[in-house]
Image: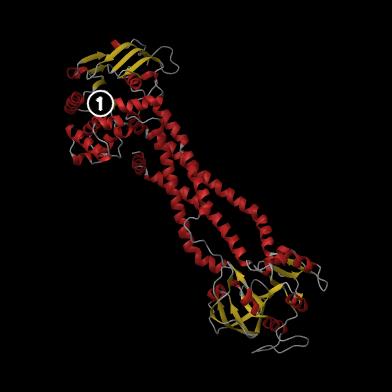
Amino acid sequence: MLPRIILASLRTRKTSASLIVVAIALSLVMIVGIERLRHQVRANFASTVSGIDLIVSARGGPMNILLYSVFRLSDPTAGIRWDTVEHLADHPDVKWWIPIALGDSHRGFPVVATNDSYLAHYRYGRDQALTLASGEWFAGADQVVLGSAVAQRLGYRLGDDMVLAHGASGPAIIEHDNHPFTVVGILAPTGTPVDQSVHISLAGMAAIHSGGQFRSGLPPRPGQQSDTPGSVNAVMLGLERRIAVLSLQRELSRYKAEPLSAIIPGVQLQRLWRMTAVGENALRATSMAVLLVALLVLVSTILAALEGRRHELAVLRAAGAGRLAVYGVIVGESLCLTVIGSLLGLALLFVAQWALAPLAQAEWSLRLPDSFLSLRELPTLAAILLAGSLAGLIPAEKAFRNSLADGLTPRN
Amino acid sequence: MVLELDNLRYQHPGQARPFIHIDHFALQAGERVLLHGPSGCGKSTLLSLVTGIRPARDGDIRVAGKPFSALSQRQRDAFRADHIGVIFQAFNLLPYLNAVDNVCLSAGFSRRRCEREGASNNRQRRIAAQDLLSRLGLDAATSALPAWQLSFGQQQRVAAARALFGKPDLIIADEPTSALDADSRDTLLALLCEQCEQAGSALLMVSHDSQVADRFHRSVAFSALNGGEHHAA
């Protein structure tokens, strides 16, 4: 009977009830949305480095190395020499290696020079390999393979010509007009920075900077093989045995020929999350404050409505309603509003995720979650519902006291 | 005895002398008593005490032989649900429920009253409620309307049906006819007395109007009953 009374009574106060529901829904969108985004960003970052055991670069800050080499969020350090790369490639602990040379960009998208190992060995997510959505991996120095977001945003198709610029970001200052590249492949979406990258061969990058003319293949230059540039910025390593990571890291930090840094991406990510925790906590505190405001609105609206409901409560009391039933009606109402608000919030979030997913994928290569509610969020939801029902206790006690003071017949 | 008051005293907080001061008052089973007196004399306060909504600290109130005033608030609430039906002067109904649902409110708080109507499930309750409503002159179509769409006279009849549901020992009516015209007043009183008779419920009605006294077994002036200070306000 109580649920019926609660719902019927709320229906007579639709306007204020819907405002509370919206307030609660929006605060839930904030709380759960921020949490989901945080989780998703972490998952995306972790997914990006999932297969890499070590990243070797010229000596520099570990965080910087991580950010520029995999996430392309920072400026690359100085290069490491090709003979060092060969040393790494021949190392008995090393299973596979991927050279990375950076520094150029195409209309804001970073250009990554690498070799065939990139396609063969780079892993993201749960041990997933890169696949080509169309075309094939580059074979020549004037060929380019685009990440899915690059192709989508810039509208390139297989066989199109494109021009690469020197400099990592912003509007290109010097465009290498004389070296048009041809799109030969487009990668399938990965939800990692790979989607935002323009991939060329090491020879291709060397050619851009050499200023030489080429149309098919690179003319060999003195002292170099045709596909070996003077230096690369980083080498990603996969090891035969993961257990060798620490010893190899130590060994490389003492490498004689040139100063190197070898970082373990997973460890650096943990450090990164510790650094960003302050900002995340501030966001979380803000969303908690929003929830608090919504709950205060809830309490004050129910309190304000009590005056007009004195007769209603007197009728219930006369029919035999005790403290428990009065509490049931009022707390039930606040719980009901919180439940509806939470469901609306989850629905809003779901729709927003669905609507923004293509944008997030294209702009930031961020895969938005597609769940309505995940197990991980149940404690948060339970806390919100609990807070909503506790908020009802204040007006419930007031309502019961009113009914005692009013006796049988409330005045007005 | 359905109701017995002994040495009942009640004063509002901050008052020096008792507002209600009744040495003895009793109501027999099935008896209909009119308690009349001017407005503001303390009749409503007395009814709040008798129904147990307001706690009586001094004196004895026994309802159906039970020392009502000695019970806890919670026990009094449960006891009221089982044994007392209440009709107000106005605003008796939850406006958003229909007549049948309003009548069933009593059933929702008392198993005893459901049993006395022979209604063990929700459907039977609604049938019993509708039956009671039709005896009070409300047909099924009217009973299905939300309460705010009913006329005032109809609302008071629904209130009477709710009070009578489950044949409680005592019906308390606080000026139930004061907002009605003479015809509606007579209709309501006739129906109420008739149904009290049928259900075997005692009726204690307070009113400022002593003209209706001939429908009652007894008529008592509140001023004769109450020795407390009640003219201060």
A93 on left or right of B75: right
Res. A114 image quadrant = bottom right
Q: The N terminus of chain A lies in which quarter of the figure?
A: top left
What's the coloring here?
Answer: secondary structure
Instruction: Say which residue label 1 marks.
Output: B176
Q: Is residue A263 visible?
A: no
> Vertical placement of A216 versus B208: above or below?
below
State the residue in front, A228 or A144: A228
Q: The C terminus of chain A lies in which quarter of the figure?
A: top left
Res. B60 image quadrant = top left
Query: Which residue appears at 78% of the width and 86% of the height?
Result: A223
Res. A321 image quadrant = top left
> Vertical placement of A107 versus A223: above or below?
above
Circle 1 — which element? Answer: loop
State the residue in front, A153 or A345: A345
Q: Is residue B5 visible?
A: yes
Picture coordinates of residue B138, whole percent (x, y): 18, 36
Picture coordinates of residue B111, whole percent (x, y): 31, 32
Q: Residues within 10 Å of mark 1 (few under 14, many from 20)?
A: many
Picture coordinates of residue A349, whole percent (x, y): 48, 56
The amino acid sitting under disc 1 is: Pro
The chain letter for the residue carrying disc 1 is B
> Vertical placement of A352 versus A291: above or below?
below
A229 on left or right of B82: right
Picture coordinates of residue A268, whole percent (x, y): 69, 61
